[in-house]
Image (cartoon, rainbow, N blue to C red):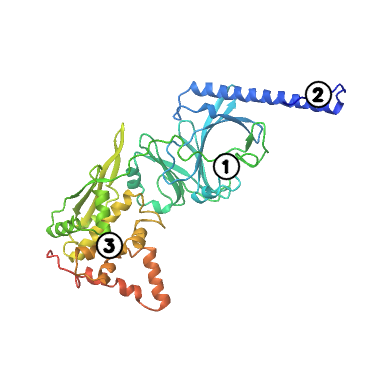
């Protein structure tokens, strides 16, 4: 136990002044805290007296900031419930400004570019790169911009669709113009895209080089921090919202209940049956069967025929990105159900050698597999064809050798490259031919031409 001995000497004036200063600061801090709490309470009462699309708020986490005009604002966190689909880090805040005895409110949405969020643990307006958009409390878009290193470069917009399928159908030809976007699905299944583009397309804003006031307001925390630098500026770091704030129960991964054939052409049906032979042990067959043939799954993989008019010139088959879809079984059952479709060109494919028909079926089956794995078509660097070129060319070759025991390894691996001529891997090999002044890769894939022309391979018997 410690004992302290009291001194009878008088307190010096300096110590007395220090005590008075501490007591004065303490009272000032208490007064400021009371004032901030009253402002939050008044904002909450005002908000509760109205009906807004933003719904209920978590007022327990509300706080007060002071902007560069010395005006107090109430900030309430309003994070995305399920996180953004592409994993971008974000901040959503509802901001209340007091106007006399009344309040005005707005929703601020900040979505960092992927590279920025990987290197920054928090938002900093001085070097921010990404999207920032402002809405009213009924979710009506007001303004937005895309920023690079803290400077506004383009106007930004957002657009909502009834579902992801509706988005893909609408923006099928627009995607190449969107330079940054992320998307979000709410509890009603509404699919919202936040992004910007410099293309003049219906539904997207354009612009560039406009250095207007950012939608965040220059401010500091009430009672602390250094002024200037914008909302979340020096003296106060605004950290990203949690990636999954409410930790929703994860949905079961999509899988396929049944592999179905709606094929009527005998030559297509014959090779389809050969590729699905239960005795086959190659990786493509076993992977497709394990994912697409599970007894406890709920999505169908369907092979069907389409006529030449439904395909681009030279296309023999395709994974149907438009009509393939999955959806929750019901409002109360999040389990996914749906169909994935593979279309085969019934006017062109049956007359090709059996090896070509099998290659098309294996190739398109891989598209379905990669789609349910979450690998998209439209990504420039990591898309389905790039993945096939890197990981599955030899696997397709091995599958063909098991289905057709007499095919050579050279021919089977050449056919594994069929349909991948627009990939970076194909281009890199072609450049290597030029650099080395040989035709190593050209000679490797040349058999594709002879198979497609019917000069090699097993005749299908169909015309």
Between residues 69 and 163, which one lies in front from this camera angle?
163
Q: Is residue 416 above or below residue 296?
A: below
Q: Nearer the viewer, mark 3 or mark 1?
A: 3
**Disc sitting over residue 214 in the figure:** 1
**Disc sitting over residue 290 in the figure:** none
Total count of labels: 3
Residue 316 in view of the camera:
no
Residue at the disc numbered 2: 5
Between residues 19 and 116, which one lies in front from this camera angle?
19
Q: Is residue 453 above or below residue 92?
A: below
Quote the CA–CA distance across marks 3 and 1. 52 Å
- Closer to the chain start, of discs 3 and 2, is 2
Quote the CA–CA distance across marks 3 and 2. 88 Å
Q: Left or right: 177 with respect to 16?
A: left
Dot 3: element: helix
**Disc sitting over residue 396 in the figure:** 3
Quote the CA–CA distance across marks 2 and 1. 60 Å
Between residues 447 and 39, which one lies in front from this camera angle?
447
Q: Nearer the viewer, mark 2 or mark 1?
A: 2
């Amino acid at each position: 136990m410690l004992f302290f001995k009291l001194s009878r000497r008088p307190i010096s004036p300096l110590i007395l002044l220090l005590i008075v200063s501490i007591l004065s600061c303490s009272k000032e801090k208490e007064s400021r805290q009371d004032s901030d709490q009253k402002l939050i309470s008044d904002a909450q009462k005002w908000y509760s007296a109205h009906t807004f699309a933003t719904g209920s708020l978590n007022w327990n986490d509300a706080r007060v900031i002071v902007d560069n005009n010395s005006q107090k604002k109430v900030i309430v966190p309003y994070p995305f419930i399920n996180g953004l689909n592409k994993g971008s880090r974000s901040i959503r805040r509802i901001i209340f400004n007091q106007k006399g005895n009344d309040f005005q409110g707005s929703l601020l949405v900040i979505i960092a570019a992927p590279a920025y969020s990987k290197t920054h643990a928090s938002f900093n307006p001085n070097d921010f790169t990404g999207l920032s958009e402002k809405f009213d409390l009924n979710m009506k878009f007001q303004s937005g911009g895309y920023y690079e290193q803290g400077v506004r470069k383009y106007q930004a917009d957002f657009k909502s669709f009834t579902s992801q399928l509706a988005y893909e159908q609408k923006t099928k030809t627009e995607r190449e113009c969107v330079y940054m976007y992320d998307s979000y699905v709410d509890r009603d299944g509404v699919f919202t895209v936040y992004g910007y583009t410099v293309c003049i397309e219906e539904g997207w804003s354009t612009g560039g080089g406009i250095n207007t006031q950012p939608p965040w307001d220059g401010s500091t925390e009430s009672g602390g921090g250094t002024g200037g630098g914008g909302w979340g500026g020096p003296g106060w770091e605004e950290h990203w919202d949690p990636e999954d704030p409410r930790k929703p129960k994860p949905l079961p991964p999509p899988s396929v209940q049944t592999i179905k054939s709606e094929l009527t052409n005998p030559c297509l049906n014959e090779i389809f049956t050969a590729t699905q032979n239960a005795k086959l042990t190659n990786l493509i067959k076993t992977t497709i069967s394990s994912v697409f043939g599970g007894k406890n799954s709920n999505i169908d993989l369907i092979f069907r025929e389409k006529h030449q008019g439904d395909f681009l010139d030279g296309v023999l088959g395709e994974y149907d990105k438009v009509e393939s879809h999955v959806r929750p079984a019901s409002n109360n059952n999040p389990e996914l159900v749906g169909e994935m479709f593979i279309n085969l060109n019934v006017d062109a494919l049956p007359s090709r050698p059996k090896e070509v028909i099998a290659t098309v079926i294996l190739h398109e089956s891989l598209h379905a597999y990669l789609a349910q794995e979450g690998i998209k078509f439209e990504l420039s660097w990591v898309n389905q064809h790039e993945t096939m070129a890197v990981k599955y060319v030899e696997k397709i070759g091995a599958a063909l050798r098991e289905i057709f025991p007499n095919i050579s390894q050279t021919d089977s691996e050449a056919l594994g490259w069929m349909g991948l001529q627009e990939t970076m891997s194909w281009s890199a090999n072609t450049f290597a031919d030029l650099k080395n002044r040989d035709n190593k890769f050209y000679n490797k894939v040349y058999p594709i031409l002879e198979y497609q022309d019917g000069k090699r391979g097993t005749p299908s018997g169909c015309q």
